[in-house]
Amino acid sequence: MPLKRECLVLLVLSWVSSLRAQDENRVLFSLGIFQNVSVPVNGTVQAVVSRIPADVSFLTMQFHTHHHNVTLSYTQIPLYGFSVTAADVGLLSNLTLNQTTVSWFLKTPDGSSAAGIGVILPYTSTDPVPGACNQEFPLEIDPNIYLQYNLFETMITFAPANIGYKREETPPACDVDVSSSTRWRLVYEVYQYFLPEGDLSEQSLISSLKRVANVQNVQDNGRKVVSLTSHDRTQFSFSSLPGQGVIFSVIVRDPVLNTSASYIPVHTYACSFNSTLDGCSDLELFCMGFGFTAFVFFVVITITTPLEYNIRLALTALVGVVGGVVMLMSWWRFGSVVACVLVVGLILGFHISSIVFFTPLGDFPIFHDDVVFWVVFACIMMFVPLFFIRWPREGNIIACGLVGAYTVVLAVNAYTYTSLSYITLDVLKRLLNHNFSRAFISVPLQDIDFILITVWVVLGISGIVVQLYREKSRPFFPPSPYVLWKQERERRKTNVLDPSHHKPSLSAQILGRIRQLTQRTEPAGETTPLLF
């Protein structure tokens, strides 16, 4: 009897522990309320929502992690076409007539643990259905935004939506008709939400995702980038900002019923937390550094050779030094004012043109055309040196003030993130990547940027004012030292009253000194004078 009782107790404890384990891997959600979820090692979590109101026609379940991939599935064992894997995942579930409970399943593709937040949003039969006219991705209805990035651009893609329908009602056809009674009346809005600059923390991401999870929050907190109709492509490119967190959201609207729905938000830092090549903790950003020659050389070798980035950077630095020496010697030896003004003016024009297109003007649709962009950019760039041909000293001083102050901004960027580094970097990206022209180049301006803009302006103006005051009584452009030396030498040759005229030349003095040190003095014999 005692043995049977112990066995019975063990069976009961085993059954209770099994139920407890199931409860631990089962998370109950409430509609519209964020829930923290932890996926255990080699485990599966069931996400459940119940008490769904009768007027709800479909639900979207979204789950977000900082950088770990998770799989969200309709079934406990993920199947192709019934699951999605990413750091930002979502599924849409149409409801049957009397359905009040829905469940989904979460796990990691590699069996590791992961933690994140999820939320379930309800929609009625009048709301458009995100991704219901999907013809590209595996899911039948796909409300996800798919994101890819490289050094130059970040691309998002999403599937078209359909107009709403009631529970168990046949969905309207997607491509049979293009009238106003079909999905072709729907419009889309793409939004950006920038995280605090340089903040790669998970807490910052979670709090930011909560601010853009649904339609109302996206409208209140996001920045609308573009609106499009159902006839436009559902694919967009943005300038990559390595180390800068950004969340992309898409809202689909039904202008006839005045309703809307949100796709699953997706985030990126344009860098990897797992890779050493483009790691978020060790970002490399190109700085013009050595000016005109280095910039041109970097562009040329990047386009024409497959060399690694570090090798290109080293060669660029070397050629930049050579270019600087050549430019300096051209002035020292020949006194070429035009060459100096041309190079300095082009650098100044490049910066001014880059600043112009860094403003919202750069996102105008007309400038997405490469021909238009480069013609306008080159015109602005070329106008500056032509303008300062008449005033070379002032042009050189303004260039030194503006560009020199900007190098301070770039130096600060090496230690803390700032969007101002993309003033010139976006132009370099467009020059090296032919597909970058379609990218939206808007970047966030936050507190550190406004501080650095102030520093830039103060340093630039103060440097220009000080140099103009110091140089006001001097020649309009420093004369060539070599020309001055030749003039002084000719003057000494012809002016016999100049004491230096009677002195041997420097070369004669050196040769004379060498002779004194190397030639042996012969004895002259008896030196005592003879007495007669």
Image (spheres, rainbow, N blue to C red):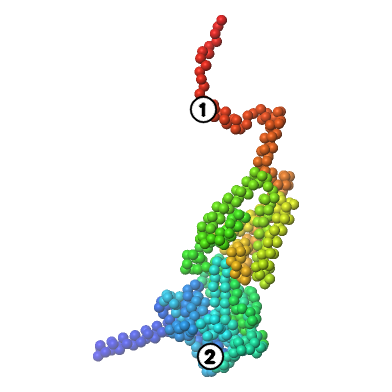
Q: Mark 2 points at which residue?
A: 95
Residue at 60% x, 74% y: name it.
236
Distance between mark 2 and mark 1 Cα atoms: 108 Å
**Spot occupied by residue 491 in the image (x, y as percentages of width and height):** 70, 34
**Spot occupied by residue 311 in the image (x, y as percentages of width and height):** 51, 57
Above or below residue 9? Residue 38 is: above
Q: Compare residues 94 and 40 and report the one nearer the observer.
A: 94
Examine the image and state in which quarter residue 170 appears.
Answer: bottom right
**Spot occupied by residue 64 in the image (x, y as percentages of width and height):** 51, 77
Q: Name the residue under label 1.
A: 518
Q: Is mark 2 on a helix, strand or loop?
A: loop
- Along the polypeptide, which appears first: circle 2 or circle 1? 2
Quadrant in the picture for the C terminus: top right
Q: What element carries label 1?
A: helix
Disc marking residue 45: none
Residue at 48% x, 82% y: name it.
83
Confirm or deny contact between disc 2 and disc 1 (CB under 8 A): no
Residue at 69% x, 32% y: name it.
492
- Taking 315 as reference, is 258 left or right? right
From the viewer's perspective, is the residue at label 2 or at label 1 nearer? 1
In this view of the protein, can residue 221 be seen by the observer? no
Quadrant in the picture for the N terminus: bottom left
Q: Compare residues 204 and 80 and report the one nearer the observer.
A: 80
- Taking 443 as reference, is 83 left or right? left
* Amino acid at dot 1: Thr
Examine the image and state in which quarter residue 205 appears.
Answer: bottom right
In this view of the protein, can residue 337 be seen by the observer? yes
Q: Residues within 10 Å of mark 1 (few under 14, many from 20)?
A: few
